[in-house]
Image: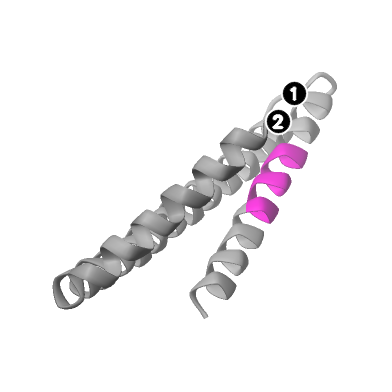
Amino acid sequence: MASNSAKTAQDILAADFQALVRDTEKLLADTANLAGEQADELREQVRSRLLQARDSLQQTQDAVRERSQEARDSVELYVLEKPWHAVGIAAGVGLLIGLLANRR
């Protein structure tokens, strides 16, 4: 479930930044020919999209921080409840990494 929400958040963030890039490119292309009120309106649209993207990035950062805190708390609880299992898992992972590193 957490990975699905993370993927959705990443998709939303990517879409926001793609829209921001498109709007910025449009601003650069159009401001050469526009003057006065039209240029100001276009710049305001880009500024609005930039603020939306910034907010989206902050929300994604907060969600990732919250999920990582929950994962850390779960791992701590598991290690406290079953320390020998945790040592065994760590040894197994270390052995696997060592075997993979030796193959190269």
Q: Is residue 46 rendered to the left or right of residue 93?
A: right
Where does residue 43 sit, x and y in percent of width and height? 64, 34
- Residue occupying image coordinates x 67% and y 43%: 20
Where does residue 16 sit, x and y in percent of width and height? 64, 52
For the question of whether residue 62 can be seen, the reply is no
Quickly name the residue at label 1: 35
Three-letter amino acid code at the position of disc 2: Ala
Judged from the image, the secondary structure of the residue bearing numbered disc 1 is loop
- What segment carries the magenta color? 14-23
Three-letter amino acid code at the position of disc 1: Ala
Quickly name the residue at label 2: 39
Where does residue 37 sit, x and y in percent of width and height? 68, 33
The answer to whether 27 is drawn above or below residue 59 in the figure is: above
- Residue occupying image coordinates x 72% and y 48%: 19
Which of the image's four quarters has the C terminus? top right
Q: Is the residue marked by circle 2 packed among few (<14), some (14-19), or many (20+) residues within 10 Å?
A: some
- Residue occupying image coordinates x 61% and y 65%: 7
